[in-house]
Amino acid sequence: MVLLNIEATSQYCNHWPTLVINHNGVQIFSDVIEEQKNIELELESIENQPNTLQVGMKGKMFGDKGVFDTVVTDGVITEDLQINLQQVTLDQVDIMDLLTRNDYTVDIVPGMKPYHKTKFKANGELAFNGYYVMEYKLPLFKYLTNAKWKKPADDGVSYFSNHTMVFHYEEQEKEIQETELILKEIDEKFSDIRTKIRNT
């Protein structure tokens, strides 16, 4: 299990907005955010494959049935239905940077122009129906460390000052796995010997 924590605030316009969370394609949360809310959910994460987390908003009206959830007065937005993500963590590790690294995907709903932009960069605000999405893998801390700080290796940098090699431990991990396999084989052989000695 992975623990998801979200701290969200909201802005009112005609009604309060609805936050929606999907995990691995299944909706696990949908609730109105009235001013401020802290959400804590356990995510049943799958080993050895990517897990997908979506955090979004639904229910904002753009003129359908005459309802607009944005009020503009003298060219200035005075009311706007939206949610702002203040903090998002997985097992107490901040993942806001990973979540907002990807574009916010906008769902086109009745009343919106069909040519409306459907993807854009944002910093935690949900001002349209749509969602942020990110993937993560287990073991979680290893994945998050690499996702946050591991850079593509650059062979053009001097060996002794090659900062791009930080977190590139693939060779060491391979050696550890080989060592563990050897130790396992040795343990099995000695186990057989111990069994024979006991039986004599």
Image: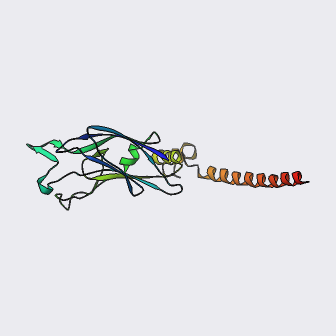
- Using the rendered view, name the quadrant where residue 116 is placed: bottom left
Q: Residue at x 48, y 46 (%)?
A: 2
In the image, residue 171 lies at what x, y percent?
62, 52
In the image, residue 114 lies at what x, y percent?
19, 62
Q: Residue furthest right?
A: 200
Q: Residue at x 66, y 53 (%)?
A: 177
Front-lying residue, 67 or 150 = 67
Looking at the figure, which quarter contains the C terminus?
A: bottom right
Q: Is residue 129 left or right of residue 198?
A: left
Query: Can I make out residue 29 in this image?
Result: yes
Q: Is residue 65 left or right of residue 58?
A: left
In the image, residue 151 lies at what x, y percent?
48, 49
Q: Residue at x 14, y 54 (%)?
A: 63
- Using the rendered view, name the quadrant where residue 37 is placed: top left
In the image, residue 68 lies at what x, y percent?
14, 50
Front-lying residue, 77 or 33 = 33
Q: Residue furthest left?
A: 74
Query: Can I make out residue 103 in this image?
Result: no
Q: Is residue 50 left or right of residue 199?
A: left
Q: How many marks?
A: 0
Query: How was the colour assigned to the protein in this rendering?
Result: rainbow
Front-lying residue, 9 or 177 = 9
